[in-house]
Image (spheres, rainbow, N blue to C red):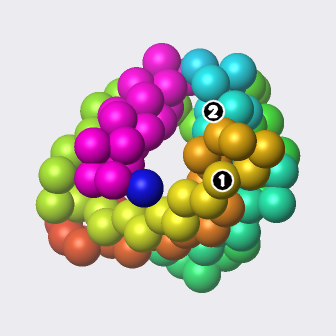
Amino acid sequence: MTHAVIAALEAELRAAQLAGDVPTLDRLISDDLQFTGPDGAFATKAGDLAAYRDGVMRVTEHQPGIARYTRVWARESGEWRIVAGTVSVTNSDHT
């Protein structure tokens, strides 16, 4: 995976998050996702997609410097998908 591929996938992910585009998120996230939130809670793909679908999760903007994400992308059936990740808050003034 090249830097250009990662950058394009991350841009597609951010656009889908901002738009609440569940079909695109579904395509980009592995069914076997293992994700840990800033509070240590475990998240699944099903829970993440349901939160977007039900309007519980709304991303209105991405602000650099507030959170740090680590995502693991892997090839599944010829497509790149997020299989694992974690997020931590980097600026407590924005929690």
Hey, what amino acid is under mark 2?
Answer: Leu
**Label 2, label 1: how far apart the Cα atoms are:** 16 Å
From the viewer's side, name the closer residue of 1 and 23: 1
Hey, what amino acid is under mark 1?
Answer: Arg
Q: Is residue 23 visible?
A: yes
Percent position of residue 32, x then y:
82, 60
Residue identifier under label 1: 75
Label 2 vs 1, first from the N-terminus: 2
Magenta stretch: dominant SS?
Answer: helix
SS type, badge 2 = helix
Percent position of residue 60, x then y:
36, 28
Q: Magenta part of the protein: which range?
A: 2-20
Residue sitting at x 31%, y 67%: 68
In the displayed structure, 59 sits above or below 3; it is: above
* Image position of 36 (left or right of 3): right
Residue sitting at x 74%, y 50%: 76
* Image position of 4 (left or right of 31): left
Residue identifier under label 2: 25
Image quadrant in which you'd find residue 25: top right
Evaluate if marks 2 and 1 touch, with contact meaning CB atoms under 8 Å apart: no
Q: Nearer the viewer, mark 2 or mark 1?
A: 1
Q: Is residue 41 magenta?
A: no
Q: Is residue 56 visible?
A: no
Percent position of residue 3, x then y:
27, 53
Q: Which mark is residue 18?
A: none
In the displayed structure, 10 sits above or below 42; it is: above
Residue sitting at x 62%, y 67%: 84
Task: Locate the N terminus and report the quarter of the image it occupies.
Answer: bottom left
From the viewer's side, name the closer residue of 49 and 33: 33
Image quadrant in which you'd find residue 83: bottom right
From the viewer's side, name the closer residue of 64 and 79: 79
SS type, badge 1 = strand
